[in-house]
């Protein structure tokens, strides 16, 4: 013991040097110490989701933490489904969770694991507790049981079934398992302390009867272990060294340890708690997210407005941006709400560095150049990314008619240059990667709406400075009116219009933002976007980051989701 661990030097270095280094968080400090002192030989962590919904941003934090600890300390991390409650669980969720963890960039150790893999062992261990006089079958109804339990300041009362003999308990437990009793007839409880100040220790439930098929074990079982009777034992069976969970489980720790003390477990994991991630304007509860889906407030779990991993993926967030966000917020022991702007910042920061550029006109108005012939064909060459030469160049046809965004033109010549850095009647603007142009005339229909802008190009201004006396107000984006693709664009706003939709006694459904989705039809994009792939974001110049929607796009009409706008409103 106490021999030096080959992993440690790196960790220590990370602590004090390298530009990316950050001080170790409190869990990393504990693990570093355990390795140094030799109390831990190999770091084994786990991410233990219940397959009763899709993962959300809070789970992403737990994933980054658990898999990240394993990576940092040369250990491994298990993906283990906590599938002890068949009533709410489904195979579909198992599959979605596996996909989400992989997409976030993590690899679990060996096969996926399930609490249900260990049901036989749990049963044998339940019999063990009964034989030791530490568990009993209790026939109180749920209401009676809760009345007997007392409350924090009032000790509970012993169940009248507490003193059943070992033989009677073994027999009743076996009959529960054989399906002789109906749901709710009886439960198996640990015999600990009905007067404990910790409610969790007041003879907690170990098994309950559930006559339901299970997604992994089918109809093999009709009794299922409680979370508490399963979790620590799963950790012990898997040799988990550091079992990290959220703060609400701090109360359960004495019970976690009680099971480890009283069962013939093969290893001795330890539990550590950290603060849940809470984001403002966001719900992070699977139950409530499921309600949004079930009641039709959103399209599905992967609706791009959902804070689910699948929703963020479909919307165009990158896995790196989510990992960076989790790194940015760190790991603490005190609960606090994080500004959702910080997540958006992380997304923008990553996409800015990686996303190819493209042009898409969301609200097109036609511009015709009166000093170019009708059949004018010229090709403009633009970089795919301004700072990434390796990504190459793209070609954009420049023709006599183009589209620009309606909002990029005004007839109002009184607007200051500072206020309106776009095209004004009688003035100049630069078309991105192309000519400087001058607006000569606005053509209108009977209703007075502008239908076309007549303009002229300033010759020899592609890739060249403006000639004397010509001062373009700014740079705008464009696309050829005769060579482009049609597309639909979906803009998203926050799903909730209240900072804490879930706070106090608020009803989160009362705070849904009715304008969280805006669908723009008839948008015009540069032709290269016909090759866009779902989940890979582009920067549409001056508009934000967009990616092809995996569900609504068709062969003839691509649909683009705006992942995030360009403007950063997170105040550091
Ligand atoms: P929910 O309340 O959304 O259903 P949960 O905790 O019941 O969440 P689990 O599937 O049991 O969901 O969670 C798996 C792991 O993810 C647990 O270890 C849990 O502590 C962690 N986790 C869940 N929500 C958050 C969160 N908001 N922040 C950090 N970790 C979380
Ligand atoms: Mg849970």
Image (cartoon, rainbow, N blue to C red):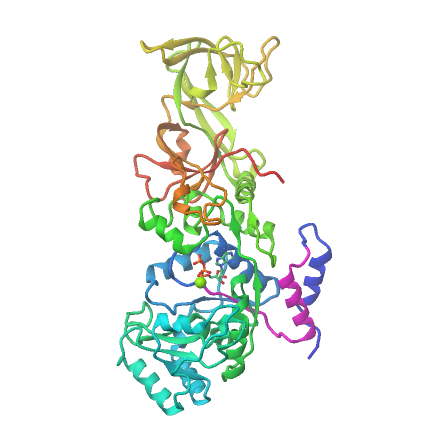
Give x and y (percent) for residue 340. Answer: 52, 44
The answer to whether residue 230 of the structure is visible from this angle is no
| Ligand 2's quadrant | bottom left
- Tell me the quarter of the image containing the C terminus: top right
- Tell me the quarter of the image containing the N terminus: bottom right
Instruction: Please report the residue visible at 46 percent of the width from the left and 65 percent of the height from the top.
Output: 48
33 drawn magenta = yes
Instruction: Please report the residue visible at 39 percent of the width from the left and 82 percent of the height from the top.
Output: 160
81 drawn magenta = no
User: Of residues 356 and 167, which is closer to you in this image?
Assistant: 167
The answer to whether residue 325 of the structure is visible from this angle is yes
Q: Quadrant of residue 97?
A: bottom left
Give x and y (percent) for residue 98. Answer: 42, 60
Give x and y (percent) for residue 200. Answer: 49, 71
Q: In the picture shown, does residue 22 fall above or below 36?
A: above
Magenta span: 23-48
Left or right of residue 39: residue 497: left
Q: How many marks?
A: 0
Q: In the picture shown, does residue 68 fall above or below 4?
A: above
Q: In the picture shown, does residue 145 fall above or below 273?
A: below
User: Of residues 419 and 319, which is closer to you in this image?
Assistant: 419
Instruction: Please report the residue visible at 55 percent of the width from the left and 39 percent of the height from the top.
Output: 390
Q: In the picture shown, does residue 530 fall above or below 417?
A: below
Left or right of residue 418: residue 290: left
Q: Residue furthest right?
A: 16
User: Of residues 424 and 344, which is closer to you in this image?
Assistant: 344
Q: Residue furthest front?
A: 154
Give x and y (percent) for residue 264. Answer: 50, 84
Q: Quadrant of residue 528?
A: top left
User: Of residues 324 and 493, which is closer to you in this image?
Assistant: 493
């Amino acid at each position: 013991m106490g021999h030096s661990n080959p992993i440690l030097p790196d960790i220590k270095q990370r602590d004090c040097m390298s530009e990316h280094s950050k001080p170790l968080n409190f869990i990393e400090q504990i693990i570093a110490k355990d390795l140094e002192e030799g109390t831990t030989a190999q770091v084994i962590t786990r991410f233990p989701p219940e397959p009763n919904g899709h993962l959300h941003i809070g789970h992403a934090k737990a994933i980054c933490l658990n898999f990240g600890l394993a990576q940092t300390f040369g250990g491994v991390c298990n993906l283990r489904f906590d599938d002890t409650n068949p009533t709410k669980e489904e195979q579909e969720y198992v599959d979605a969770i596996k996909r989400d963890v992989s997409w976030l960039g993590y690899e679990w150790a060996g096969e996926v694991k399930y609490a249900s893999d260990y049901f036989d062992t749990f049963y044998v261990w339940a019999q063990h507790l009964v034989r030791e006089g530490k568990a009993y079958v209790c026939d109180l109804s749920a209401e009676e049981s809760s009345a007997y339990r007392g409350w924090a300041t009032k000790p509970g009362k012993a169940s009248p079934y507490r003193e059943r003999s070992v033989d009677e308990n073994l027999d009743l437990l076996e009959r529960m398992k054989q399906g002789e009793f109906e749901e709710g007839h009886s439960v198996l409880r640990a015999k600990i302390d009905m007067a404990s100040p910790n409610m969790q220790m007041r003879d907690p439930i170990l098994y309950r009867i559930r006559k339901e098929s299970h997604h992994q074990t089918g109809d093999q079982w009709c009794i299922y272990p409680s979370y508490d009777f399963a979790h620590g034992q799963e950790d012990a069976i898997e040799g988990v060294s550091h079992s990290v969970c959220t703060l609400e489980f701090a109360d359960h720790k004495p019970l976690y340890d009680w099971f480890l003390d009283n069962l013939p477990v093969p290893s001795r994991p330890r539990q550590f708690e950290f603060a849940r991630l809470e984001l403002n304007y966001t719900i992070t509860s699977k139950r409530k997210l499921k309600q949004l889906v079930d009641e039709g407030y959103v399209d599905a779990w992967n609706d791009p407005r959902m804070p689910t991993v699948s929703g963020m993926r479909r919307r165009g967030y990158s896995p790196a941006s989510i990992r960076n966000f989790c790194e940015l917020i760190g790991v603490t022991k005190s609960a606090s709400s994080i500004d959702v702007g910080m997540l958006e910042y992380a997304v923008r920061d990553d996409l800015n560095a990686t996303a190819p550029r493209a042009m898409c006109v969301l609200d097109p108005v036609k511009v015709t150049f009166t000093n170019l012939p009708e059949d004018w064909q010229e090709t403009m060459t633009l970089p795919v990314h301004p700072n990434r030469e390796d990504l190459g160049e793209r070609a954009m046809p420049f023709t006599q008619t183009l589209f620009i965004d309606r909002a990029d033109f005004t007839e109002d010549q009184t607007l200051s240059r500072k206020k309106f850095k776009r095209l004004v009647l009688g003035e100049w603007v630069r078309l991105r990667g192309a000519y400087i142009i001058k607006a000569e005339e606005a053509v209108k229909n009977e209703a007075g709406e502008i239908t076309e802008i007549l303009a002229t190009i300033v010759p020899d201004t592609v890739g060249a400075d403006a000639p004397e006396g010509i001062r373009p107000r700014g740079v705008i984006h464009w696309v050829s009116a005769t060579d482009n693709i049609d597309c639909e664009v979906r803009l998203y706003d926050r799903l909730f219009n209240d900072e804490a939709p879930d706070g106090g006694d608020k009803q989160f459904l009362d705070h849904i933002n009715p304008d969280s989705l805006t669908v723009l039809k008839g948008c015009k994009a540069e032709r290269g976007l016909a090759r866009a792939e779902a989940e890979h974001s582009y920067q549409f110049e001056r508009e934000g980051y967009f990616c092809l929607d995996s569900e609504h796009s068709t062969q003839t009409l691509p649909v683009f989701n705006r992942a995030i706008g360009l403007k950063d409103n997170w105040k550091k």
